[in-house]
Image (spheres, rainbow, N blue to C red):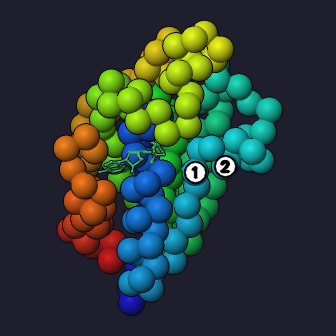
C-alpha cells in the first residue's frame, strides 16, 4: 500500500475525546497496514516534556517538542496521530506551516459535557481549586477557526468521528 506521511493533530478540551478517537483511529489505520505512531500529550509529559508545567510558555514548549517529533516521523512516511489539548492557536498554526502534511482535527464537546464526563477527575479538582490553570476552567482554550475536521463528540458516536477523519485522509490521498 502506498502511504504518504501525515500528522493528524487532535486538539480539544480535556475529556473531549482525543485519546478515544486517536486509539480507534490507530486501530483502523493499522488494520489497513499503515505505519502509525501515536503521540499522546499525557504520555509525552512523562518523558519528552518532563518537567514542563502548564504556563503558556511551557504549554507551547510541550507542543513544539511534540511537533518536532511528529515532523520527523511525517517526513519518513508515518501517519502520526497527536492527541494533545494544544490550547493555543498560534503554535498549532506554526506547526501546520512547518510540517506541511498536517490535518487539524477539532475534537469539540461543550465544556459542560467534558466536565460531566470528567474522565480523569480533573475538572472536579480544578473546580475545587486543587489544580490551577486548568484549560476551560481558569486557562484559555482557543478553538480552531478553520479545522480540517470537526468531531462533535457530544452528538456523534466514536465510530462516526473516526470515519470522518478516515474519509478526509482518503480524500486528501494520504492512503
Ligand atoms: P481526552 O483525550 O480528550 O481528554 P478521552 O478520550 O480521555 O478525552 O475521553 C472522552 C470520553 O468521551 C470517553 O469516555 C469516550 O468514551 C467519550 N465519548 C463519547 N462519544 C465520543 C466520540 N464521538 N469520540 C470520542 N469520545 C467519545
Which SS class for mark 1? strand
Q: Position of residue 51 (x, y in %)?
A: 80, 32
| 24 horizontally vs 155: left or right | right
The residue that mark 2 highlights is: 43
Query: In which quadrant is the N terminus drawn?
Result: bottom left
Report, in whole angstroms, how far the alpha carbon at label 2 lies from the one at label 1: 5 Å
Asked if labels 1 and 2 touch by Cβ distance under 8 angstroms, the answer is yes
Q: Position of residue 98 (x, y in %)?
A: 49, 47
| Relative vertical location of residue 11 with respect to residue 59 in this rendering, above or below | below
Query: In which quadrant is the C terminus drawn?
Result: bottom left
| 165 horizontally vs 41: left or right | left
Residue drawn at x 78%, y 39% as measured from the top left: 50
| Relative vertical location of residue 127 with respect to residue 9 in this rendering, above or below | above
* Figure disc tally: 2
The residue that mark 1 highlights is: 40
- Disc 1 under 8 Å from ligand 1? The reply is yes
Residue drawn at x 21%, y 50% as measured from the top left: 156
Amino acid at each position: 500500500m502506498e502511504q504518504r506521511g501525515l500528522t493528524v493533530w487532535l486538539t480539544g478540551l480535556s475529556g473531549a475525546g482525543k485519546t478515544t478517537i486517536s486509539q480507534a483511529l490507530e486501530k483502523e489505520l493499522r488494520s489497513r497496514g499503515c505505519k502509525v505512531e501515536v503521540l499522546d500529550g499525557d504520555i509525552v509529559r512523562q518523558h519528552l516534556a518532563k518537567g514542563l508545567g502548564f504556563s503558556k510558555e511551557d504549554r507551547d514548549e510541550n507542543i513544539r517538542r511534540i511537533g518536532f517529533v511528529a515532523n520527523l516521523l511525517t517526513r519518513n512516511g508515518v501517519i502520526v496521530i497527536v492527541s494533545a489539548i494544544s490550547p493555543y492557536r498560534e503554535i498549532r498554526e506554526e506547526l501546520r506551516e512547518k510540517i506541511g502534511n498536517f490535518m487539524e482535527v477539532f475534537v469539540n464537546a461543550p465544556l459542560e459535557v467534558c466536565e460531566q464526563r470528567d474522565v480523569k477527575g480533573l475538572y472536579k479538582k480544578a473546580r475545587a481549586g486543587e489544580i490551577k490553570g486548568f484549560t476551560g476552567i481558569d486557562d484559555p482554550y482557543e478553538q480552531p477557526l478553520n479545522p480540517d475536521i470537526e468531531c462533535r463528540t457530544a452528538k456523534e458516536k466514536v465510530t462516526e468521528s473516526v470515519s470522518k477523519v478516515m474519509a478526509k485522509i482518503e480524500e486528501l490521498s494520504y492512503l
